[in-house]
Amino acid sequence: DAGITQSPRHKVTETGTPVTLRCHQTENHRYMYWYRQDPGHGLRLIHYSYGVKDTDKGEVSDGYSVSRSKTEDFLLTLESATSSQTSVYFCAISESSGSGTDTQYFGPGTRLTVL
Amino acid sequence: AQSVTQPDIHITVSEGASLELRCNYSYGATPYLFWYVQSPGQGLQLLLKYFSGDTLVQGIKGFEAEFKRSQSSFNLRKPSVHWSDAAEYFCAVGQGAQKLVFGQGTRLTINP
């Protein structure tokens, strides 16, 4: 299994509070991603990073920000959580070798409930 | 824009029966195609992928998939399912492994 951990694994918070989710990898992969998973929507990309301090928006980035100060850590922040952000959040990593071996590997997920 | 369609939201098959899960994609270039499986409460595990070469791809757990460019499809198959195959299956498309677009998923139920 790819060395990806997510913390916390479960969190319950209240509307309007800030929340930060952490993704940590031990694979030294260049790319890191945050997805959210909701019933009927599959996985949707929130933000991704292609290197330290290099990030870009995904399909559903509104209300989320990210930071990557080290290769191994990618943080997802909800500045002011809303009930619509109740979801399961997955971190993923990948490399870009161009050899055809590239694959995204996923962490175990964080279940976030916003009351 | 790239997109993935998994037409079947939920499929039920009997243990020992054959399985085919459908995946259709829209992509402007030669795609990388992936199938992932997710057991309840777990993350996603890669079953197999296609990026070039032989259009019939073998994966883990006895799964295979066939890339058909003319039909823009990448259907997943297994000749005989086991109760442990009950899970949700996701098809994804991308350029390399970056910025994948996922289908909505197909939930597989196995009848004993």
Image (cartoon, coloured by chain):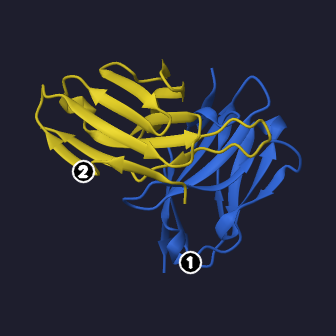
Identify the image quadrant of residue A96. top right
Label 1 SS: loop
Q: Please, which residue is most extreme toward the front here?
A: A70
Q: Are marks 2 and 1 in contact (CB under 8 Å)?
A: no
Residue B12 vs A31, above or below: the answer is: below
Whether residue A38 is visible here, answered yes or no, is no
Judge from the rendering whether residue A88 lies leftward or rightward of residue A24; answer left or right.
Answer: left
Chain drawn in blue: B
Judge from the rendering whether residue B91 lies leftward or rightward of residue B63; answer left or right.
Answer: left
Nearer the observer, B38 or B80: B38
Crowd band around label 1 with a 10 angstrom C-alpha radius: few (<14), some (14–19), many (20+): some
Viewport quadrant of the N terminus of chain A: bottom right
| Residue B4 x, y percent position in the rendering | 60, 35
Residue bearing the label numbered 2: A10
Residue type at the position of mark 1: Glu
Crowd band around label 2 with a 10 angstrom C-alpha radius: few (<14), some (14–19), many (20+): few
Same chain for the residues under marks 2 and 1 in the image: no
Tell me the number on the disc at residue B15: 1
Colour chain A is painted in? yellow
Residue type at the position of mark 2: His
Nearer the observer, B41 or A106: A106
Residue B56 vs A74, above or below: the answer is: below
| Residue A80 x, y percent position in the rendering | 19, 23
Kindly identify the residue that appears in the image at 50 percent across and 42 percent down: A92
